Amino acid sequence: MLIRRFFGLCIPAFGIAFSCLGQTHPASLADLPDPLVGTDSKYELSHGNTYPGVFVPFGMIGWTPQTGEGGWLYQYSNDAIQDFLATHLPSAWTEDYGPFSLMPVAGELHVLPRERAAKFKHAEEDAKAYCYSVRFENGMRAEVTPSIHGGVLRFAFPAGQKAWVVLDASAGGSAIEMHPDTRTITGVNHHIRGGFPANFGQYFVAVFDRDFAEYGAWDKGGVAPGAKERRGEHVGAFVRFAADPGQTVTVRVATSLISPEQALRTLQAEIPSSDFDHAAARARSAWERELGRIELRGGTAAQHRTFYTALYHAFQFPHALHETNAAGTVEHYSPYDGKVHPGTMYADTGFWDTFRAEFPLLALVAPARDAEIIRSLLNAYDEGGWLPKWPNPGYANVMIATHADSIIADAWTKGIHNFDGGKAYAALRKDATEPGTGRYEARNGIADYIRLGYVPADKVKESASCTLEYAYDDFCVSRMAHALGKIEDAALFAKRAQNYRNIYDPLTGFMRGRNADGSWVAPFDPLAWGGVYTEGNAWQWLWSAQQDAAGLISLLGGREAFLARLDTLFSMTGDYKVGGYGKVIHEMTEAKMAGTGQYAHINEPVHHVIYLYDYAGEPWKAQRWTHQIMDRFYLPGPDGWLGDEDTGQMSAWYIFSALGFYPVNPGQPVYALSSPMFDRAVLHLENGKTFTVEAHRSQPGDVYIQRAWLDGRPLDNCWIEHREILAGGVLRFELGSQPNKAWGTSSIPAPADGL
């Protein structure tokens, strides 16, 4: 039967009902994700760069145990927890905004992070998507479960010791107020980075279920017993509770980016009582619904956990920043103009990473959410004048190109039209034709790109990568224009989508940096990272013309020459020149790439490359390599993930590849085929239909497609169209241990779409 089992919450542990502890078997889909996967990360050796986030899908904040100050929030190698942090962080190494935290303290009061830290062992830790719990070596126990804008924390203290809870409003400008009569602490954190409105603040309210026996405020200068308020660079509060043997303290927390009144309103709406188990059950149910969009049969238990861990990561971002006001309508604080506006707002996602598979995944399995995110992008356009390219939460000039163009065009071409298409096209066209203004750079060097047909290296850094990705984004603008009947614009941007050809050097056979006078940047080393390339080298960026696979094959000398280059990519040395990336990055990447040549799956520009074998007539190699990458780089355990999760992209690649198809060219509603990992995967589509992928194999290691059928009809194309999935039905594969080199070669490459 399909792996969808329902039991009660969790069995009790330690004498009270600690929701996350004491389980030995998964109780439901919501119990399958492992938030600890990928947490054994550090600068010199990256294993996913994740943290054990506890959140509801797409919630405004999440919670995580924090083991250090600055840098990674949680590193598996650490043995002490400093607090439980309310966070927006899109990645474990980036900088947060508006953070604050709570921490239980037993015995003597300590308020500073390192001093209040409590040691623990991982055997006493349990991490679920909907609940995290831990027993400390000093006898304290802690749990946290989320709501959309807050959460509930429950702390148990050992008998005979004073029981404290420390609230840390964090650095960057903060304030707290004590309200002992109502067992409440309110506060705000104003920590912002460049590009934020000056009036930014995250307001929070924390309501306890026990009376305060003692309370006060603190800052780095010390504690102030009895103080009811404190403001400064970094302040906090503390409360003590009357001692009872084995007592527990529960605190409900809610946040708002709008006002303290809105935070209290949200608390009353989302968490009306101090029933921790009820809150955990609601969060668990939210995960059950989202993860239930895809059901699996076959494969190993470890593969199931990996798949749903990936789906957990994919549904973590972007964060929904909108809130429901007193009138019952949705509004949001704008990170673009600092005002409150009606409508939705999403943030904390890197489009440079996520346009490739994360957003195509949402377009497929959660199109209503995808449309809501796009409507939020258009709100950002209204409020700030541009589409963001790395909303965190507002304009951030991080990475290159304007891949909101891709996200919008991909949705529109897949029939997701419940947003203003005319306004969306105006925003895309602005990205493609106008230089950024003020704090937002949009496509850096766009005027030269339009004039020369490429981005000049002597004026713009990472120019080769910029040229390639601007050309791809032009393809997306062209597709949107064509769909809206703007024929002249469609032709103009389709022509510009060919600009990738202008930086191809036939003498070296690579995409290269080119100066404004037309000369090539020298010296040239195809193994050198950085320079004219973004987080990669010439080998990894050679393939970034996914909008024109047939044209790229021709440019590289035809099908046989193209296949030879692809084979070389995977078989050549995994060494490279680090440039400005540093020795430790070199060592980390070299270790991860071992056995895959210059195919650096740890970073996103190559994520579509394996599937180019489909376009060139050797799809069996795509089948082999996708399974090798899944089997090697997506493993259980804290060190089992790879590279940098990057707000869901690494996970989305795995999800698609495990299902057996992948969106090589977002903006074109076509998926290239590989072979599925599971015997059966059922996609429950929002239109009420189901699409099922079945794999019939003689033994577990069979990965090569022998034959395929779509709704009973023989299928020899190594691609399917989005509309065929939406229609529902069954895609069935017969798999074997040896490649069928004739299958999937009768119609290559996949159908062209506008170029």
Image (cartoon, helix red, strand yellow):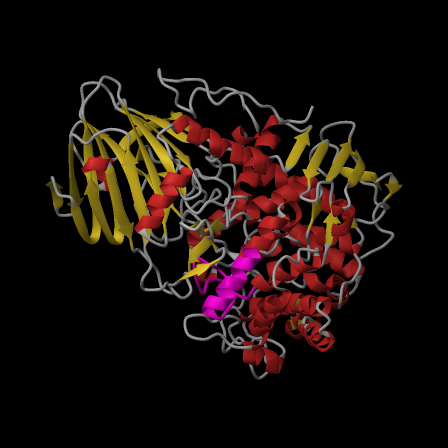
Q: Which residue lies most toward the front here?
A: 327
Residue in the foreground of this view, choosing between 374 and 593: 374
Residue in the foreground of this view, choosing between 528 and 68: 68
Q: In this view of the protein, can residue 403 be seen by the observer? A: no
| Quarter of the image where one finds residue 751 | bottom right
Pinpoint residue 442: horizontal percent, then vertical percent. 51, 70
- The residue at the point 21 percent across, 46 percent down is 177
Pinpoint residue 43: horizontal percent, then vertical percent. 40, 48
Residue in the foreground of this view, choosing between 746 and 172: 172
| Quarter of the image where one finds residue 355 | bottom right
Tell me: 378 left or right of 620: left
Tell me: 581 left or right of 161: right
Pinpoint residue 555: horizontal percent, then vertical percent. 74, 68
Specify the segment rendered in magenta: 373-402
In the rendered image, which quarter contains the N terminus?
top right
Tell me: 646 left or right of 405: left
Pinpoint residue 659: horizontal percent, then vertical percent. 69, 40
- The residue at the point 74 percent across, 56 percent down is 564
Q: In this view of the protein, can residue 648 be seen by the observer? A: yes
- The residue at the point 69 percent across, 29 percent down is 297
- The residue at the point 72 percent across, 66 percent down is 483
Q: Main secondary structure of the magenta part?
A: loop
In the rendered image, which quarter contains the C terminus?
bottom right
